[in-house]
Image (cartoon, rainbow, N blue to C red):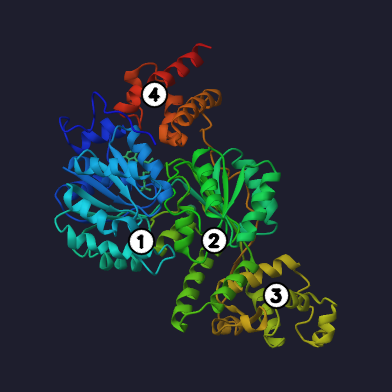
Amino acid sequence: MIHPRAPETNPTHPNNTRNPHTLLRSIFGFSEFRDSQEQIIASLIEGEDALVLMPTGGGKSLCYQISALVRPGCGVVISPLIALMQDQVSSLQLLGVQAEFLNSTLNEHETARIEQNLLAGKIDLLYIAPERLNQTHMLRLLEQSSIALFAIDEAHCVSQWGHDFRADYLQLSVLHELFPSVPRIALTATADDRTRKEIISRLQLEQAKQFISGFDRPNIRYRIALKHDARQQILKFLQLEHRKDAGIVYCLSRKKTEDIANWLGEQGFDALPYHAGLSSAARARHQARFLREESVIMVATIAFGMGIDKPDVRFVAHLDLPKTIESYYQETGRAGRDGEPANAWMIYGLQDVIKLRQMMDGSEGSEEHKRAEQHRLNALLGLCEVTSCRRQVLLAYFNERLENPCGNCDNCLEPPQTWDGTEAARKALSAAWRTEQRFGVNHLIDVLRGADTAKIFQFGHQHLPVYGIGKDRDNNQWRSVFRQLVAQGYMRVDLDRYGALRLEEKCRPLLKGEINIELRKDRKIKTTKQRTRVTPAPEIDVELWEKLRDCRRQFAEELGVPPYVIFHDTTLQEMCVRLPRDLEDFADLSGVGERKLLKYGPAFITEITDHLAG
Ligand code: ADP
Ligand code: ZN
């Protein structure tokens, strides 16, 4: 661990003005607050509780960090993942903030030192895990100390409804009882209403001011396409767009994460698997490499991601469908936290729909619960099949209206073509009906295309009026029709009959000729036109960019921290554009506070000057 010695000019020292704006500049090196940050900080300083819903990358941490520095006493941050505390604390220490963490990775000696410092009022921000906060010893200690505020990060962990539930979070209501006058701030990027209500009631935040930001992530480009050869598709995507970037590839099964990681490794990518079945040592090792290095790809199940605040994740790819739009939003949200362009890329096919439907039907739980799940899956499939702007659909799901199409999703960039699928849909539905709704998609297509398989003859399907009426379309086109019929809820997958397709009530008017249906023309994900600007931006001098990255890497290695802790990509890009030649210019860069200016400014300025001279 790094413990910077008490500096001669401590920017957080009480002699300096404890004004939020001054701290924003002097410590963090930012010139303006974003959206609601200023109001949130103002209410905390006033001693009020706050509930903050802000998308990932919105700037939540700054809200409690600055408030804690302004208020007397130590800000206590409850954060669910011990493994991630160290980097958060190192980042703050580099900014000159007296930050520490207390968790089970520390030895007795270190723990005692930090506890002493806490009692002596020498700590600005203390990160602790929820389980520790529930220990009597810890609560005693806090009662004897001066506390500026409690920040409950990833507050949705208190919700039993979501999949990040942590039993220890339930105990956090004790804070309100033991420290009634200390303001609490609960933060989450989870957008849905039900979770919010649960946070409020479980943490007794009824009196808290609510700050709910828009959930749009404009720098993320959403793309969803048909799966035809998953391995080749992901390979091409990575080769063309993310040769050297860090990213996450989500898969449904543990085995698949390992297979894909191995295979990507053979293709020359630095890919690591991550799932709950790996030993905790392996998980920690892979996570550390992902965080510390600049171009590691994590091939993971949903076990990976919560609390990972690596800002430069350039893409999130889904090789399997997530279960809901909430999960999709949360998982893709891990890309582009630094605000730079990032890709959310997903491929899916009929098999995925069938698999998910089966998993849901087979899951335990009441009928009502299953219906709710089906409903949420339908919304996700709607997002996959929509022909208009995806961002509008995504945000509408969270009750947010986006006036105009976004211009940064595949449908906006290259509007998909549609065709009148009424006739084809009727044929497809008839095929299922005539075969007594007992067969899966492959056989139905065989019937429609007039194939002469053994199964056709076994069941006498060559005599049906639907036999051979679909010769005009090929296999893929029929799969596309069936997929869209299932996705749009005209058909469903029968679990008891191994994936047989059945008709739903909804198809009645379609069969009667009362309504028409527009279908989407499938196409492959295009990589050429839609290619995202990779970092660095095209106008940037790549040679200088690489030199600055090297410089950053050296500092990071010396300190044993991830490179982004030294400077974010955003700051490096700005260096390449503005080419600061002295400390005064350097100080103007976003993300350069007083401490980093003195510590790193000279080295980076030398790199820039040498580069320009050479
Ligand atoms: P969250 O916790 O909401 O996901 P972070 O607190 O990690 O977001 O902030 C995301 C990024 O935005 C970080 O790189 C952070 O330094 C930056 N940031 C936050 N507030 C500001 C601001 N007022 N001006 C410029 N950058 C900011
Ligand atoms: Zn769009």
- Is 495 placed left or right of 324 in the picture? right
State the SS at label 4: helix
In contact (CB < 8 Å): disc 2 and disc 4: no
Q: Nearer the viewer, residue 221 or 82?
A: 82
Q: Quadrant of the N terminus?
A: top left
Q: Nearer the viewer, residue 575 or 221?
A: 575
User: Where is mark 4, residue-wise?
Assistant: 600
Name the N-terminal-most of marks 3 and 2. Answer: 2
Please state the horizontal and vertical placement of residue 546, each as a whole percent of the image. 54, 26
Measure the C-alpha gap from mark 1 to mark 3. Answer: 40 Å
Name the N-terminal-most of marks 1 and 3. Answer: 1
Measure the C-alpha gap from mark 1 to mark 4. Answer: 37 Å
Viewer-side label of 4, 3: 4
Name the N-terminal-most of marks 2 and 4. Answer: 2
Badge 1 amino acid: His
Q: Disc 2 beta carbon < 8 A from ligand 2?
A: no
User: Where is mark 1, residue-wise?
Assistant: 156
- Is 48 placed left or right of 98 in the picture? left
In contact (CB < 8 Å): disc 1 and disc 3: no
Name the N-terminal-most of marks 4 and 3. Answer: 3
User: Where is mark 2, residue-wise?
Assistant: 387
Quarter of the image where one finds residue 453? bottom right
